[in-house]
Image: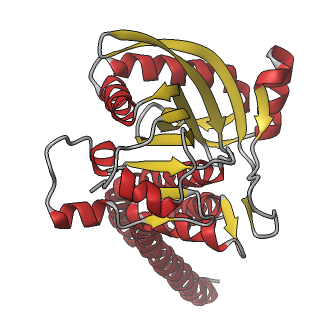
Amino acid sequence: MPSAPPPRVELGAIVALRLYDVAHSIDLAQVESIGAELAPAAVARIRLTRADPKAIAFGVPPVEIGLRPVELELDGIWRRLEATARVYDFGVISIALRAPVAEAAWDEFVDLAGALNRAVSGPTAGRLWTELAESVRGLIAPALERPAPPGLEEDYFLSLVRRFDEDLTAEELQRRVDLVPLLSGERRPLSDSARRDLLRYAFSYYRNDLAVVTWDQAFLYEPSGDTDVADVLEVANAQLLELRYYDDLLDAELPRMYDRVAAARRAVRGLFPRKYANLARELYALVAEVTEITEKVDNALKVTEDVYLARIYAAALELFRVRSWAAAVDRKLSIIRDTYTALYDEAATARAELLEATIVLLIVLEIVLAFIF
């Protein structure tokens, strides 16, 4: 718990993120071209600024698009929120609503975070997010490869402070400020174990920066103004969303695969082994497609030497259970691969048996013709 009055927030922001899967993949070069024609200053590639590119970098840097500001009522007060979108090459768009904060007491900062969280999570906010997502989809429509219907989405929440009214180290900040109400949205005191779990993933690199990450939101104190930590957390959410999408896709495909295999086996008994081969090729194409896109997802962020960002990234992957989703996708791909192999082998066997039967038939026919003529 804080041992002294909390400092005032001189400069910061509250950011709500909503991510959508919109296509199989997106041509980012075409997105840049579209943006350059409409509003050149509002479109840019994103890169990490804190780290050496050799240490950590985007596999394919996403494109950021500036959107029109949004008016939103927060606890009875209308506020003007900045709106931006980011487009990832593996088919995800991320929309951010940002409420700037200046000269606010800590309790006011916490209250604003809670108000924005409630406003963007409530039932009436669905139309706002949908309109923003559809406006981005419409803008980049020519760059979408195999557009996907509206479906899965992810959200995340960031509380950012760039400057307090006094210089604080990370240790002093944690003594002076109780982050639990901010990160949990709870005003009632939490148990010691719940507090420990909530504050478990806390990271600092310099004496005066701090990142505390939870499964649905994070607090970031970054006097330099770097956004690398926020960018890394967004990428982890985008990876989670895409893996969830392909997990659902394979869940739907497996029962259909079993039915089609059974139908193909019945056809083979009727001497149509080509259906086996056709089905095997379709399954192989599915495996290749999903493997290609999951490799893109895995390589969305390349981490080698930057220990600080690598630790935060690893913590986010653990909290979001990204590796568990990836393992689930791999298991289902393995089932389809095994089925493809079995179908291919059975098709080859069926063709060999058909060939043998044809040869025997021709021999019999030749003998019969010899007796006749």
- Could you tell me residue 366's position as x and y percent? 62, 86
Left or right of 34, for residue 363: left
Quadrant where the C terminus lies? bottom right
Left or right of 41, for residue 197: left
Q: How is the image coloured?
A: secondary structure
- Could you tell me residue 131's position as x and y percent? 48, 16
Quadrant where the N terminus lies? bottom left
Who's the residue at 46% across and 76% down the image?
Answer: 334
Q: How many marks?
A: 0
Who's the residue at 30% across and 28% down the image?
Answer: 118
The image quarter in which residue 135 lies: top right
Left or right of 287, for residue 88: right
| Front-lying residue, 207 or 265 | 207
Who's the residue at 80% across and 17% down the image?
Answer: 39
Height in image: 3 above or below 171?
Answer: above
Q: Is residue 201 visible?
A: yes
| Front-lying residue, 173 or 64 | 173
- Could you tell me residue 308's position as x and y percent? 61, 69
| Front-lying residue, 59 or 243 | 59
Left or right of 95, for residue 30: right
Q: Is residue 214 visible?
A: no
Height in image: 360 above or below 332?
Answer: below
- Could you tell me residue 60's position as x and y percent? 75, 53
Q: Specify the farthest residue to the front.
A: 4
Who's the residue at 49% across and 68% down the image?
Answer: 276
